[in-house]
Image: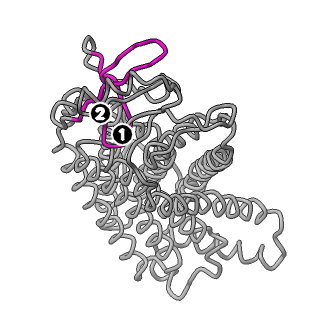
Amino acid sequence: MIHFGASHVVNSITVAFAALFVCANVLGAIYTVRTLRLSRPFPVVHSFSLLWGTRLMLYCTASVWVLSSLLRLPLLWEISWLPSISEERQRTLCHLQPILAQGISQPWCLLLAVYSIRLVFSHSSDKEKPPFVLAWAWEAIERNLTGMSRLDSTGSAEEDFVVAAQPNKLWDRFKNLTVIGQSLVTALPLTLVLALLLRDTTVSPMHSSVNDLSRSFTETAHRGDPEECAGISTPCTLCTCPLLSVIVSIVFTVGYCIVSYFIMCQARRLVVNYNQLRRILTLQGLTACTVMVSTILRGVSAAMPVGGWGYWVLVTADIYLAALAAGAVTFVLGLKPTYDASMALHYQMPPTVLAMDIENQDAKELILMKDNALYERDDNTSSVSERNGVYGRGLVVAAAEPAKFEALTSTSSSDALAAQT
C-alpha cells in the first residue's frame, strides 16, 4: 500500500475540518435566509437570489474539496477493508480528483454566468415589466433607495407618493461596480471553460509529449518517492490545469465579495439587526477568500516536487483552512437568530402616517419605513405589507397635523399626488 508518513494524519484532520467547514457555511446560509424572510417587507430579501447562486457554487467547491480528501484516504492510510484496490487503481483515484473538481465547479460557473447575463439584460428595459423576477425585485430596490417611482406597463411615471429623498449617489456608483462584478463572473469562466474544451482538440505532437511528461510526473508524485521526484518539475502547469482552477477561484471570489458588499449596503438601510447579518456575510466572504487562497496554494504545490516546498505549502493550506473552519463553526453556533418582523417594527418605532384614497374615501394608517416606502400593518396577523402604488393618483398622505390632512382632503383637485410628511 502507498504510505506518505505523517501526511495521512494531516489529511484525516483536513477531512474532519472540511466537513465542519461545509456545515458552518450551511448554518450561516440558513441563518441569513431565516433573518431575511422574517424581516419582510424589506425588499432586500429578493436580491439574495444572486448571492445564493454564488453561495451554491461555493458549496460545490467545498464539497469537492471534502470528496477529494476522502478519495485520498485509501492512498494515505493502510485501511484493512480495502485490500482489493491495487496501487494502479488508487493512482487512478488520485487522477480523478482534479477531474471531479473541475467537472463539478465549471458547470456551476456556467450556471452563475447565465444567471448574471439574464439579470443584466432583463434589467435593461424600463418600459415593460422584465420577464425575470429577480430583475423586477432589483427595480423595486432601486426605486426604494432613490425615492423614485417605478414605471408602469405603459411607460408613464405615475408617482404614488412624494418623499423627501434624493437619488443615492453611492448606490449609482456601486451599481456600476455590481455590473462589473457580474461581467467578471460571467465572462472569464466562460472563456476559461471554452479554452479547456478546446485544449484537448488542438493538441500538437509536442504538446502531447508534454502531457505525457506531466502525467508521468503526476504518477511519480503520487507514489511519494523522494528519490524519483528529485529534480523533476512539471513542465507545463496549464496542462495539468491548476492555473485554470486558480483563475476561476480568483474570479469567483471577486464576484462573490462584490455581491456580498452590495447586499450589505442594502441591508444596512433596511434590516434592523444589521450587525449580525454583516458578520454572516463577512464569514461568507472570508470563506470565499479562503477557498481562493487554498486553491492558489494547491496550484503552487502542484508545480513543485513532492517532498519539497510543495508538500509544506499544501500542509500549510490545509492547516489554514482547518483553523478558519473551526472558527467559523464556533462563530455560527454562537449566533442566536431570534428575530421577528413585528418585533423589529415595535423596537424601531417607525413613524405612521394617514393616507386616504380620495376616490374611494378609504383612509389607512400606513407605516413610513427607513427606505421611505409605505407599509400597512395587519393587526390580526402582526404582519406588514407594502402599500406603494395600490391607491393610484388619488392617494393623499397626511402630515403630522390632522388639520392639514383635512385641508388636503377637502381640495377638489384630484391631481394632487401627495403631501410631504
Estimate the x, y position of residue 352 in percent, counting from the top left: 25, 30
Which amino acid type corresponds to the residue marked 1 in the rendered image?
Gln
Quarter of the N terminus within the rendering = bottom left
Mark 2 residue type = Ala
Out of 16 and 220, give the one closest to the viewer.
16
Q: Locate residue 381: give its quadrant.
A: top left
Q: Nearer the viewer, residue 24 or 45?
A: 45
Q: Which residue is drawn at 84% across and 76% down?
A: 205
Q: Contact (CB < 8 A) between labels 2 and 1?
A: yes
For the stretch drawn in magenta, what is the main secondary structure? strand
Indicate yes or no whether the magenta region holds residue 368. Answer: yes
Look at 40% across and 64% down and name the residue there: 289
Decide which of tag 2 and tag 1 comes sooner along the chain: 2
How many neighbours does mark 2 have within 10 angstroms: few (below 14), some (14-19), or many (20 or more)?
some
User: Residue at label 2?
Assistant: 399
Tag 1, which secondary structure?
loop
> Is residue 74 among what the camera can see?
no
Pointer 1 local density, CA inside 10 Å: few below 14, some 14–19, many at least 20: few
Label 2 and label 1: CA atoms lie apart by 7 Å
Q: Name the residue under label 1.
A: 420
Position of residue 106 measured from the top left corner of the image (x, y, whole percent): 61, 53
- Which image quarter: residue 356? top left
Q: Is residue 242 left or right of residue 13?
A: right
Residue at image location 49% in from the left, 80% down from the top: 305
Image coordinates for residue 389, horizontal then vertical, percent: 49, 28
Viewer-nearest residue: 215 or 154: 154
Magenta residue span: 350-378
Residue 324 magenta: no
